Image (tube, grey):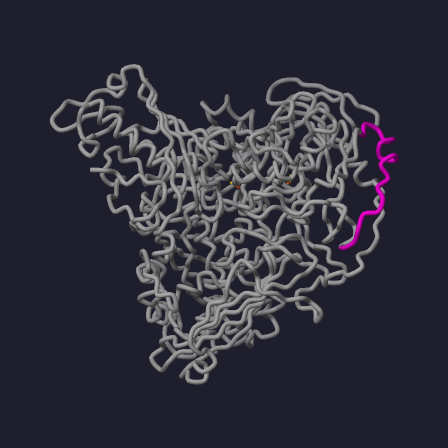
Amino acid sequence: MSLHFVEFELNGCQIDGMVEARRTLLDFLRCDVGCTGPHAGCEHGVCGACTVLVEGQAVRSCLMLAVQANGKTVETVEGLSGGPKELHPIQQLFREEFALQCGFCTPGFLMTLVALDRSEPRPNAAEMREALSGHLCRCTGYQGVLRVIDRLTEDRK
Amino acid sequence: MHLPLSEMYNEPDDRNVLDRMRQGVIGQPLDRPEGALKVSGQATYAAEWRIDGCVEGVLVLAEIAQGQVTAIDRDAALARDGVLAVIADPAMTRRSAQGMAAKAPQQDAAKVEYFGQPVALVVARTFEQARDAAVALRVDYADAAEPVPFDPHAPDVKVEAPSSSKPVEGGDLDQAMRDAAFSVDVEYDTPGHASAAMEPHATIAQWQGDSLILHGSYQMLAYNVKEIADCLGISPDKVRIIAPYVGGGFGSKLGITHEAVAAALAARELGRPVRVVMSRQQVFQTVMRRSETRQRVRLAADAGGRLIGLGHEALVSNLPGEKFAEPVTQATEFLYGGENRLLKVEVARISRLTAGSVRAPGEAVGMQVLEAAMDELAEKIGIDPIELRKRNLPATVPVQGTPYSSRMLTQALEQGAQAFGWSARQDRPCQTRDGDWWVGMGVASAARVNMMVPAQARVTLRADGSALVETDQTDIGTGSYAILGQIAGEMLGLPMARVDVKLGDSALPPGAGSGGSFGAISTGSAVLYACEEIRKRLAKILGCAAEELVLKDGTASHGDAAPRPLRDVLGGEDLTTTGKIKPGKTAKAFSQASYGAFFAEVGVHAFTGEVRVRRMTGVFGFGRVLNAKTARSQCLGGMVWGIGSALTEELAFDTRDGHLVNHDLAEYHVPVHADVPAIEVILLEERDAAASPLQAKGVGELGICGAAGAIANAVYNACGVRVRSFPLTLDKIVPSLPDPFAQTL
Ligand code: FES
Ligand code: FES
């Protein structure tokens, strides 16, 4: 199968590569780039674990082909902070509120929340909850994530 | 004093060692130490290791349910772009290993026993090439000469007594039912469930000479090493499994499954690393299911509401010859009285993927049915369901006469009633209306057996005064990193920043593994014992008795002596030792279980029958709380599984051809947070010395054991519809709904 040239901005760095048209953005990020923060939980748009930001919008990267990202801006969980020692405020809230156990679903929740947090006008708690209802977590029972939302929206009042 | 550090846990350890320590970290709601890695995308899960030259394998699943593979068109596959190998080796597994099997599961994948069983592996340079060739691979089959039924209730199904459990029989249940002032005799169905851990099973296999390294997603490494080695016919010391971060397990990763063996075989054949990641659909179809159950519960009570008879009989299913049978009546054995009893599980031999452990095997489905039946009995007697439960707590385990180690059930029921506002509950259904919704409340007991399994952990007090805990124990999200570090920190008087915990590598001393809620108490006890030994050695250096030694904030002192930094005391030496524990006489001498109570308020839509859980409270007593945050999170997660079990989760098999109809997360409905209301969790403080030297019991599964019963009981209390088939979907409720225009009845 023929290869296509793709280049885009990933977490602030310009990257490029040759990729088959059938390769998803998720697999391109994970396997070709080695950016494994986005996780594959279902590979058909149901679980949200693969969520990344494309042009600032939360996107399920299992449902997008890598070639479609050409020329765009892509952000993954790795780009939110300088690593485990300097966490983004929402990452920090996730830790503090125990919004994760195994952590497999976590990057997806984070990216959707970050997109919401940045959007104007800023959504309220109910809208944030609504937007997160398409993310699956099998471990935590969701209460920690909901407290993160409460704290995020409290901070703004 | 001689410390009872014998490996076998024969006597309850009443010394309460942890309570005498000074650091004050045990029990605290501390954050998980690996949390920062996980929120920044840096924790490496099985499929994510970068290994040079690694190629990709994709499993090929059977498209028939029962028969024999007669031919595989390798040549056509190998002619495709990038394809390197088609593996159809007799060593490939056709069933998954059960938890703690420590030996190979059924191999020879050419014999097809259920729809979707793996029959081959296609390996190619890229994942897409392998997937393409796997889909196109032509496999010819011969149908089985003597197929077994797909349906556990088929007339010709073979029903057997399981080899794994014996019935409990006492007195004369039939007579008790005849003598009873009040009785219920009801049949409930529960469907099959999937663990649906968010990380699909994945393995990267790599040979170095005749040694195999697997990066995999597993719960119990010491057992998994033996299972892999047995499958491949090599010595266990040639196998190493690395799994520091596991994306959930819930039973599905207790034993090895197909992708690990297939990857190892392919890597051996190709002489290069091979990665096999299962698709979500493959995980559903081939790994492990919780059996569906049909349960008959008989309850016979005297005029005072005391049980004189109790029957709990279940029909479960599994593949022919498979030992595991969902132990549905496990908690019924000890929970309530009723000397005249019959508790029994039978297993129907059918063609569906392997049935095995899914979170809280036994209690998860047994308790929800028993607790729903208890609600039916309370209604017949006309007493409060909490009162019925409190009246029926026996002094010793019926029939066996074993004493209870500790039991917080009454406290949980009473404290929960208070916190939840149970007194506002209406005795009769259809009394509370909120707009278009009937509103009701339900209660259920929680119970889950406590188990200890053999475990080892190595602890090193380093010369610089920091500590290292090492064991092959996994952390599947449960909090092993946090808890094991806290035990060491408490015992050695170190703040958490000075304790490192290394897990998930089979080269380390064998911990308990994660399963059956036993990981924290078993491996934690091994850590405790190792730390006690280190304390003894420190005491010797300081010339005092171990009991006099005070360790706090990295210093050691005794008597009136001024605290000295550990670094000085150690004088450049590391102190290292391995703690070991095994279950002993306490396991049989006491009935050990964790207990609790669930309270649920639900709304049932008066027109559509839709059920929404409005709020829930869970109160739990499981011995010492090792970390209030991880424990709470386990309970919350469990209760949400209860919501799934009550309302949404169901494996649907087509009984015509045996295929699993809803084999993905779009069709198998795991609750999302919109299904989950505010949940309150209350943890009761308790010490249970019979359970472990930590005085702790297991909590990982307790939150699910009975939760769905409370929801079903609340549904009845709301709208007067008793559904005896889980999940309580609206189609089962609508036909019996009362007049929606009546505001109360
Ligand atoms: S992997 Fe993309 S939504 Fe599940
Ligand atoms: S933390 Fe495990 S799936 Fe969410």
Left or right: B190 with respect to B477?
right
Tell me which segment is drawn in magenta. B66-83
Residue B425, percent across and down?
39, 69
* Picture coordinates of residue A103, whole percent (x, y): 52, 36
Tell me how many marks there are.
0
In the depicted view, which residue is nearer to us: A156 or B106?
B106
Percent across and percent down for residue B574 are 34, 20
Quadrant holding ligand 1? top right
Q: Is residue B65 left or right of residue B188?
A: right
* Quadrant of the rendered image containing residue B371: bottom left
Taking the image as drawn, is residue A131 in sight? no
Does B70 sit above or below residue B207? below
**Quadrant location, the N terminus of chain B:** top left
Magenta run includes residue B418: no
- Answer left or right for B61 relative to A86: right
The residue positioned 76% from the left and 32% from the top of the image is B123
Any part of residue B36 in sight: yes
- Residue B481 horizontal/vertical position (percent): 43, 34
Task: In this rendered view, identify the residue nearer to me: B444 or B601.
Answer: B444
Q: Which residue is drawn at 64% across and 52% down?
A: B354
Residue at the spot 67% in from the left edge and 38% down from the top edge: B259
Instruction: Indicate whether A9 appears above or below B480.
Output: above
Is residue B73 on the magenta stretch? yes
